[in-house]
Image (cartoon, rainbow, N blue to C red):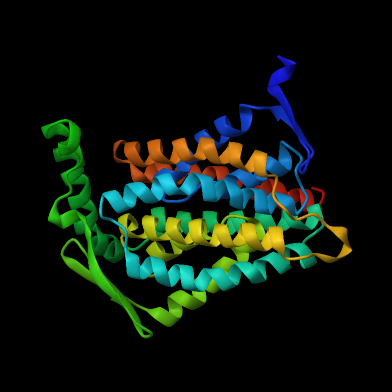
Amino acid sequence: MDTLYVDFPVSGVHTWVFLPPLVAFAVSFFSSMGGVSGAFLLLPYQVSVLNFVSPSVTSTNFVYNVVAIPSGIYRYIREKRMAWPLAWAIVAGTLPGVLLGYYIRVLLLPDPRVFRLFVGCVLLYIACHLIYETFWKSRRKRIRIKSPESGFIKNREFSNKGSMGRDTERITANAVVRPGSLSIRKIEYTFGEETYSIGTPMILSMAFIVGAIGGAYGIGGGSILSPLLVAVFNLPVYTVAGAALLGTFMTSIAGVIFYSVIPVHSGMTTTPDWLLGVLFGLGGFLGMYCGARLQKFVPQACIKAMLVLIMLFLACSYILKYFNI
């Protein structure tokens, strides 16, 4: 049995070889239903349970994203629900933000105690936006996205009841993202019977800030952007999730490169623990695919409520520990 335990030299972690993929599968299975990769929950697990607290934990989390996210992106592209104009704007804004986040993590937050406070604040921020989006969003905003989302769910249910095989993947014209446009002034695309238009400078600015936070935290920023785009810009969650995941995937690749290549003074190690990151990623790859497939059977409010409870617990725990309470 001892042969199934592995020492990871970069992180100093000693654990059962199947534990990382199992944990990642469980986390990504549920979090992918909400349109995020689950990296924001894996990092606290690595810090608290595996005692992996060096800056390398951030780059290892990026490795998880790079391995795990493609399966989720594949589902959104296959179902024609990738809002490409929005996705490319997110990528353009978050990529430079990740570089800034790298220096924030290495130069300003190298102390594990301070980093835990930062993690707690980020989780609390995400939880508050999910609470707002799920429970306190005005009825007017709900009505605006009701038609395309309801049509999507209805079409999926009809398709699953009607036949097997390829017919179960049939996507009707009312449930796909139609080609839009991306310019310096605005981003535009159509979903269902409604065209959505948002200012490009606002998305780029928000993506840059989120990219900096994600670059320091190791999440790519999708878990912050997704609730913001739904709650603030009133975009349908079915079109936001794919774009946010693609942005997270691209910025995670950049994050791995930054943390692996850019030299750091004071002899601090920032390169990822590749083996640990890949093991997490393999579990996440399967979990995200399964979660995306089964999402339609779970009420959206239940998914978000579960994520909110987990994040609030972790956020309060880290913040209270920082103040020794």
Q: Quadrant of residue 146?
A: bottom left
Question: What residue occupies the far left of the structure in this picture?
Answer: 162
Q: Quadrant of residue 167?
A: top left
In this view of the protein, can residue 311 be seen by the observer? no
Q: Position of residue 46 (x, y in %)?
A: 69, 41
Question: What residue occupies the far top of the structure in this picture?
Answer: 1
Question: What residue occupies the far front of the structure in this picture?
Answer: 261
Q: Position of residue 177 (x, y in %)?
A: 24, 61
Q: Is residue 155 above or below residue 187?
A: above
In this image, 61 relative to 198: left or right? right
Task: From the viewer's side, name the closer residue of 265 and 196.
Answer: 265
Q: Residue at x 47, y 63 (%)?
A: 225
Q: Is residue 13 above or below residue 56?
A: above
Q: Quadrant of residue 175?
A: bottom left
In this image, 195 relative to 263: left or right? left
Q: Position of residue 170 (x, y in %)?
A: 16, 44
Q: Residue at x 21, y 41 (%)?
A: 169
Q: Is residue 145 above or below residue 325?
A: below
In this view of the protein, can residue 218 be seen by the observer? yes
Question: What residue occupies the far right of the structure in this picture?
Answer: 266
Q: Residue at x 26, y 61 (%)?
A: 145
